[in-house]
Image (spheres, rainbow, N blue to C red):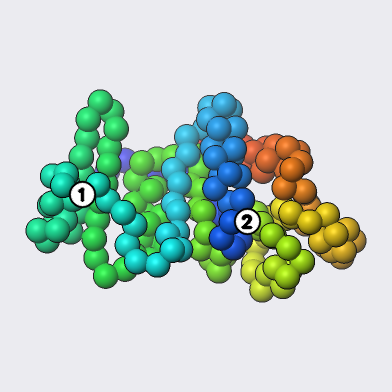
Amino acid sequence: MAMVKEPVIFQVSGYQNSGKTTLVNKIISGLKGKGLSVVTIKHHGHGGKPETPEGKDSSNHIESGAAASIVEGGGRLLLQAEKKSWSLEEQINIAVQLQPDVVLIEGHKKASYPKALMLRSDEDRYLIEELTNICALFCWEDKVIKHKAADLETPFFSIRDPKGTEWIIEYLVSESKKKK
């Protein structure tokens, strides 16, 4: 059996509407431009189950009791799977089977993977002490940056500063090279 390569796992964490999806999309584009493949895992933090396309065979299979349904066409593979709950580790194990260079996790802020933390306001600053393995901080308010920058070695970026995204992309490229 062929060995599956180990990808770099990186999180983008923060509260709802902090810019996580925007940053993840920029990271994906940047990594693709550097020739790396990316698989994403997104935490659906809105309560309940994520929407699935109603009336489609794959959704009907799930509703009929299938544990999983895979649809392939034109090189695109869609997976729907259902059970009571899925741990982050189970989701990562599925993602790793696709042999990406990087697995980007949006959300799951309490997990211990290396992460970028998005701070909407000064009120979110407590997350700096509460969360682990923070590699970079992105702030909406410059006063958060000025207040904490002197206290930490973690790089701080304004949400509007493209250097932050560039820093993460270079970090992930470097980590990926170490895995090869």
Query: Residue 151, how many percent across, how many down?
Result: 87, 65
Rounded to the nearest angstrom, the CA distance separating label 2 from label 1 is 30 Å
Labels 2 and 1 touching (C-beta < 8 A): no
Query: Residue 72, how many percent across, how many down?
Result: 22, 35
Residue 18's mark? 2
Task: Pick the quarter of the image with the N terminus.
Answer: top left
Left or right: 121 in relation to 33 = right
Task: Indicate the secondary structure of the residue bearing disc 2.
Answer: loop
Query: Residue 176, how many percent across, how many down?
Result: 57, 40
Query: Residue 164, how many percent across, how many down?
Result: 73, 43
Residue at x 31% of width, y 40% of height: 2
Residue 54's mark? 1
Figure quadrant of residue 5:
top left
Few, some or many residues within 10 Å of mark 2 (<14, 14–19, 20+): some
Residue at x 55% of width, y 69% of height: 110
Residue 67's mark? none
Depth check: give the residue in front, 100 or 165. 165
Residue at x 64% of width, y 69% of height: 131
Q: Is residue 81 above or below residue 27?
A: below
User: What amino acid is found at the position of numbered circle 2 in the picture?
Assistant: Ser
First in sequence: mark 2 or mark 1?
2
Figure quadrant of residue 85:
bottom left
Few, some or many residues within 10 Å of mark 1 (<14, 14–19, 20+): few
User: What amino acid is found at the position of numbered circle 1 in the picture?
Assistant: Glu
